[in-house]
Amino acid sequence: MKKPVSAINRPLLNHQIIEVFDVKVETLSDVKILRALVNEITRRYSFKILKSLIYKFSDKGITLMYLLSESHLVIHTWPEMNYLHIDLLTCDKFPLKIGTTNLQEIIQEILHSSNVIISQINIQD
């Protein structure tokens, strides 16, 4: 007999879906800048990178995938649309702000875009 959904044991998950608009094509096509963004996020939030994969598409789009000890961080760029998408999933509480660290400010500073939308989905038992 299946348990009712409310009785299913689930882990605590925090899913950040981040959209960044109006980013320069040069920024979205530059692996060094995108790595700097990942490095700053992982440093400020004390995430540990276990593995990474970077793939450059022929149209200059880039996907960066990072396996974290906390879960994963994935970045996709669409230079032709001046758009970047970040998918960050953590298996713990994820405050958007730690002390003076603000996720939106980190992204705005490194990508030079003030048009950042962060959606947060919390799944907990």
Image (spheres, rainbow, N blue to C red):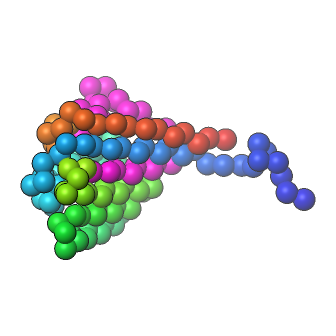
Q: Residue at x 27, y 43 (%)?
A: 20
92 displayed left or right of 86: right
Q: Position of residue 101 (x, y in %)?
A: 27, 31
Q: Is residue 69 left or right of residue 39?
A: right
User: At 83% across and 52% down in the image, what residue appears?
Assistant: 3
Could you say which quadrant of the image residue 124 lies in? top right
The magenta region covers: 84-107
Foreground residue, 66 or 78? 78
- Which residue is pictured at 45% across the width and 50% down the height? 89
User: x, y percentage for residue 121?
Assistant: 51, 40
Q: On the rendered structure, is 32 left or right of 46? A: left
User: Magenta stretch: residue 15 in it?
Assistant: no
From the viewer's perspective, is residue 118 above or below residue 43?
above
User: Seen in the image, is 92 located left or right of residue 56?
Assistant: right
User: At 19% from the left edge and 57% from the top edge, which residue is drawn?
Assistant: 79
Q: Position of residue 123 (x, y in %)?
A: 59, 42
Q: Residue furthest left?
A: 26
Q: Can you see residue 73?
A: yes
